[in-house]
Image (cartoon, grey):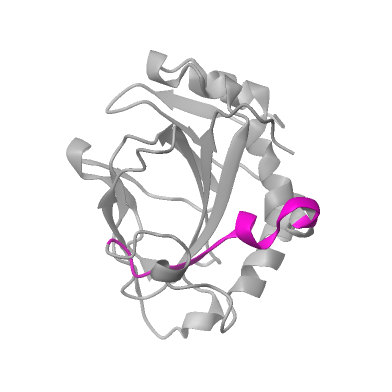
Amino acid sequence: MENLVADAFVEPFPHLIIKNFYNEDELKLIWEELNYYTKPGKLLEAKDYGGAGKYTNAKALVLDLVYVGKYRSLSNILSVNRKLFNQDLLAAFSNIHDCCNIARDVNNDCTKVRYYHNDEYYEPHTDRSIQFLGFTYFYKEPKKFTGGELYFPKYDYKFECENNSLIMFPGWVEHGVTKVSIQDSDYYDGQGRYAITSFLSNYKEPIT
């Protein structure tokens, strides 16, 4: 996997972290799409994209609902994030703990892009209907915001969400996002925090 280094942790809950997950060519493709979505009228309110509106005020878009069937290849993100299904990566995650051991067999996913600007957050919640979660994070450098950490209140644990980092963990782990604070920045200049969430599961039908 391009010499990627995966750090596996059993405590405080099973999770896998990879820094610099995407290479430079893949990042260019991702940013082309993220910049496009950071325009008026592109991202949706939580109540309109099937998100937990009572938990978050950040806008997002479910890419699988936009790029359906043969149109999936039109999304740069849905193309490059197939990298999550690399068997070495899934095996490394599967081997962390018995509760992760079916991760090597995941064959279905849903991808959501979310953007956090000033005063936006996500309160703690669980994704109990999802077996595994993969989050990747992106922001323009130099970084102009504070906050936006992924936090796990039941475990007194935070993940700093470094640029181009990946974290994977089971869906039953409660998690949230601390409030983002950014000064002298218009929402649409894209200086906030981006998250690409992959909801990973096992189904009978293979990924297409």
| Residue 62 visible, this angle | yes
Q: Which residues are magenta?
A: 55-71
Check the image and name the residue furthest to the front: 204
Residue at 40% over, 38% down: 129
Q: Quadrant of the C terminus?
A: top right
| Residue 193 visible, this angle | no
Residue 13 coordinates in the image, percent (x, y): 31, 27
Residue 106 coordinates in the image, percent (x, y): 58, 27
- Is residue 182 rendered to the left or right of residue 71? left
Whether residue 150 is situated above or below residue 45 in the rendered picture: above
Residue 168 coordinates in the image, percent (x, y): 46, 35
Residue at 39% over, 69% down: 47
Is residue 75 highlighted in magenta? Answer: no
Residue at 27% over, 64% down: 54
Residue at 50% over, 23% down: 93
Residue 113 coordinates in the image, percent (x, y): 54, 59
Q: Nearer the viewer, residue 163 or 85?
A: 85
Q: Quadrant of the N terminus?
A: top right
Whether residue 62 is situated above or below residue 37 in the rendered picture: above
Whether residue 155 is situated above or below residue 118 in the rendered picture: above
Q: Nearer the viewer, residue 27 or 64?
A: 64
- Is residue 204 rendered to the left or right of residue 197? right
Is residue 65 highlighted in magenta? Answer: yes
Whether residue 173 is situated above or below residue 124 in the rendered picture: above
